[in-house]
Image: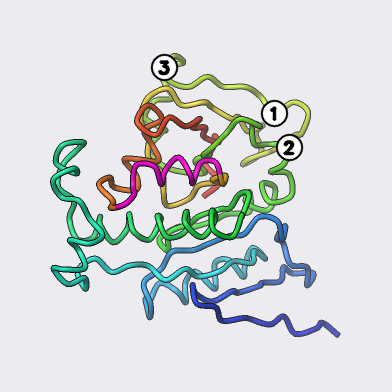
Amino acid sequence: KRAIIWAKTTLSGTKIPMADRNGQVVMDRSLPIFVISMPNSDRRDAIVRDFAQHGVAFEFFDAVVGRDLSHSQKAELYDDTRARQVEFALSDATIGCALSHKHIYCKMVDENIPHALIFEDDVHINTNVHMFLQKYTHIVPKNAHIVLLGGGYHRFLRTQKFLQFFMLKNTPFIVDGKPAKIGKCYVPSSGTYAYYITKAGAEKMLIHQTPRICWGADALTGDMVVGNHNLYAILPYIA
């Protein structure tokens, strides 16, 4: 008889260990999976069903709701002057998103978490996530700080100078029946709805978001020049 798999509530959210069709939890405990979601969001039910279908354990991380921040709270957390200098003024939604990602980066640094997967609650994972979870230690380049699992980098595929691909020969990683590729990004990309990040990558992101945020999450993680980080992407998408 299959044992009951428990869920644990934490300050940052709810851990939802899931079992696959054989009752096996598909998660390397050394690779935490955080799903950013607004408290009481209707999307949470869909995320639980989606991840349960694929047997992937994860932890909800309560998102910051930008529109709920008071004027004083926003002034304490967000540097509007600097934001306009580096990019442009951020909307309430973008501020909330950036703060949510920043909080996970702080958690990684404070708790010495070497790497993690971060998803937003509009993500749709697929069966290829299984393969990544099982083989990520062999798939992810040793010098990578961030690896996009899905996002806006597809528009650069037509020109090889933007993405330098290399095949995963030593560890076969099949996506949709084809060998997957890892591409190093050479122009700004986007994809914070699904990405892998190391502690070193989190530290680099915090340099630009401390003491107050001034970058949108997508803009910073996807700009390897500003962030001074090694940015890679998996193709085809796995989320």
Callout 3 amino acid? Thr
Residue tagged 3: 159
Which residue does the image show at 38% across and 37% down from the upper left? 222
Circle on res. 216: none
**Image marks 3 and 1: residues in contact by CB distance under 8 Å:** no
Image position, residue 121 (x, y; %): 42, 63
User: Is residue 204 on the magenta stretch?
Assistant: yes
Residue 62, image quadrant? bottom left
Q: Nearer the viewer, residue 236 or 195?
A: 195
Callout 2 amino acid? His
Give above or below for 142 relative to 55.
above
Give above or below for 36 relative to 17.
above
- Helix, strand or loop for disc 3: loop
Which residue does the image show at 29% across and 47% down from the upper left? 216
Which residue does the image show at 35% across and 40% down from the upper left? 220
User: Is residue 170 on the magenta stretch?
Assistant: no
Q: What secondary structure is the magenta-colored segment mainly?
A: helix
Q: Quadrant of the N terminus?
A: bottom right
The extreme right residue here reads 1
Kindly report which numbered mark, 2 or 3, lies closer to the viewer in this rendering: 2
Residue 77 appears left or right of 142: left
Callout 2: few (<14), some (14-19), or many (20+) C-alpha neighbours within 10 Å?
Answer: some
**Image marks 1 and 2: residues in contact by CB distance under 8 Å:** yes
Circle on res. 168: 1
Residue tagged 2: 138
- Magenta-colored span: 200-211
Image position, residue 217 (x, y; %): 34, 48
Give above or below for 156 relative to 1.
above
